[in-house]
């Protein structure tokens, strides 16, 4: 029998051990790879990474349809299925003149001159303030009477003090310069801490009782703008000129911006109550009627107040109501050197004004007696 030398036997044993180790490692690797494939195939569809990839528009290829359709029951519940009504109608742009009233009714009014409101429309305005309503007042002309900005600013200050009296509180007012979407510029003021009240000045030229204007403002008038005799009208403070259509659109924008429950203004041209009134009054009433009469939400609440011709109607204010109205007017006149009156008695004795103060006649559209 041939004997194998010990060193050769050791080498064979080492080779067998190496082969067995290699086979074991290969088996482990095979099991690991199989496990990875099994995990990939059996991974649940709710994995967060999968949902993120589906929800992110940047991770998907562009679709030719603006509303991609999801099919199958495996669609993620975090992605709503589009419907024909899923796209909302865009909201209209908000006007720079928008003012919130916190649920209270809003009384909007448009007047020709600072003081027309407290002469012809009170106690309607003072009653609204006392009831906690929001009151938004707009004056279209400066009421300058050809006397320049010093007189304009004095009248405007008088109005602010009259509104302080109506709201029963003294205080400062803050001013905002607002440019409407129409391009019309207004100077709007509110009492500090009392956003219910605002007064806005447009400052177009006063047209004069003769309707011929004043030399200081180039004889430009709102009537001429309304009738087409001039194409534009510039405010007395040097602001940008406006056209007739722009004024109408601005009135409509202001009404849309505040959503009034009631709107007050002058008797318009063409009414049986217009002859004898100030031409500026009649034109402002006509502009407001043109702007708002077709608005189903606003038109029913419009009231037109009789102006100068009211002196020919019966007196219908007296007692405490008249006293409050006259006192409000007296406070205003302390800033207006043309019609200043010292006390109740003197205010009521003032020619014309004393009679107007004792009356207030609002008219609905049906009562205008348009000819």
Image (tube, helix red, strand yellow):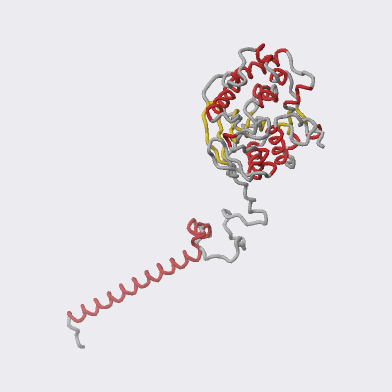
Percent x, y of residue 201: 58, 33
**Residue in the foreground of this view, choosing between 65 and 47:** 65
**Residue in the foreground of this view, choosing between 181 and 258:** 181
Residue 325, compared with residue 298, is above or below; it is above
Can the viewer see residue 306?
A: yes
Residue 161, compared with residue 16, is above or below; it is above
Percent x, y of residue 86: 64, 53
Q: Which residue is drawn at 74% across and 23% down?
A: 360
Q: Which residue is drawn at 51% across and 58% down?
A: 56
Percent x, y of residue 273: 78, 30
Residue 169, compared with residue 71, is above or below; it is above
Q: In this view, does 11 lie to the left or right of 230?
A: left
Q: Quadrant of the C terminus?
A: top right
Q: Quadrant of the N terminus?
A: bottom left
Residue 175, compared with residue 64, is above or below; it is above
Q: Residue furthest front?
A: 215
Q: Which residue is drawn at 40% across and 71% down?
A: 30
**Residue in the foreground of this view, choosing between 314 and 308:** 308
Can the viewer see residue 100?
A: no
Percent x, y of residue 325: 67, 18
Number of marks in picture: 0
Q: Quadrant of residue 109?
A: top right
């Amino acid at each position: 029998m041939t004997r194998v030398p010990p060193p050769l036997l050791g080498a064979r044993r080492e080779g067998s051990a190496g082969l067995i180790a290699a086979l074991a490692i290969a088996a482990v690797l095979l099991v690991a790879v199989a496990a990875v494939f099994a995990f990939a195939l059996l991974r649940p569809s709710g994995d967060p990474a999968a949902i993120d990839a589906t929800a992110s528009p940047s991770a998907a290829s562009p679709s030719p349809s603006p509303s991609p359709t999801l099919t199958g029951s495996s669609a993620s519940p975090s992605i709503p299925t589009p419907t024909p009504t899923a796209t909302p109608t865009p909201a209209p742009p908000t006007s720079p003149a928008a003012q919130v009233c916190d649920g209270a009714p809003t009384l909007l009014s448009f007047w020709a001159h600072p003081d027309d409101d407290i002469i012809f429309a009170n106690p309607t305005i003072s009653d609204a303030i006392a009831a906690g309503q929001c009151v938004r007042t707009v004056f279209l002309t400066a009421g300058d009477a050809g006397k320049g900005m010093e007189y304009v600013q004095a009248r405007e200050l008088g109005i602010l003090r009259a509104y302080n009296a109506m709201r029963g509180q003294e205080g400062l007012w803050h001013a905002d310069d607002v440019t409407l979407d129409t391009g019309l510029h207004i100077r709007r003021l509110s009492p500090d801490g009392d956003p219910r009240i605002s007064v806005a000045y447009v400052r177009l030229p006063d047209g004069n009782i003769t309707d011929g204007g004043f030399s200081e403002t180039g004889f430009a008038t709102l009537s001429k703008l309304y009738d087409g005799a001039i194409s534009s009208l510039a405010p007395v403070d040097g602001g940008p000129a406006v056209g007739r259509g722009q004024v109408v659109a601005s009135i409509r924008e202001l009404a849309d911006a505040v959503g009034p429950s009631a709107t007050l203004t002058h008797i318009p041209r063409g009414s049986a109550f217009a002859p004898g009134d100030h031409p500026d009054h009649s034109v402002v009433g006509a502009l407001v009627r043109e702007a708002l009469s077709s608005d189903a939400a606003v038109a029913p609440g419009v009231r037109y107040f009789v102006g100068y011709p009211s002196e020919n109607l019966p007196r219908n204010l007296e007692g405490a109501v008249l006293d409050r109205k006259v006192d409000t007017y007296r406070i205003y006149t302390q800033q207006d050197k043309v019609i200043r009156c010292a006390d109740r008695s003197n205010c009521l004795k003032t020619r014309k004004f004393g009679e107007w103060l004792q009356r207030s006649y609002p008219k609905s559209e049906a009562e205008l007696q348009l000819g």
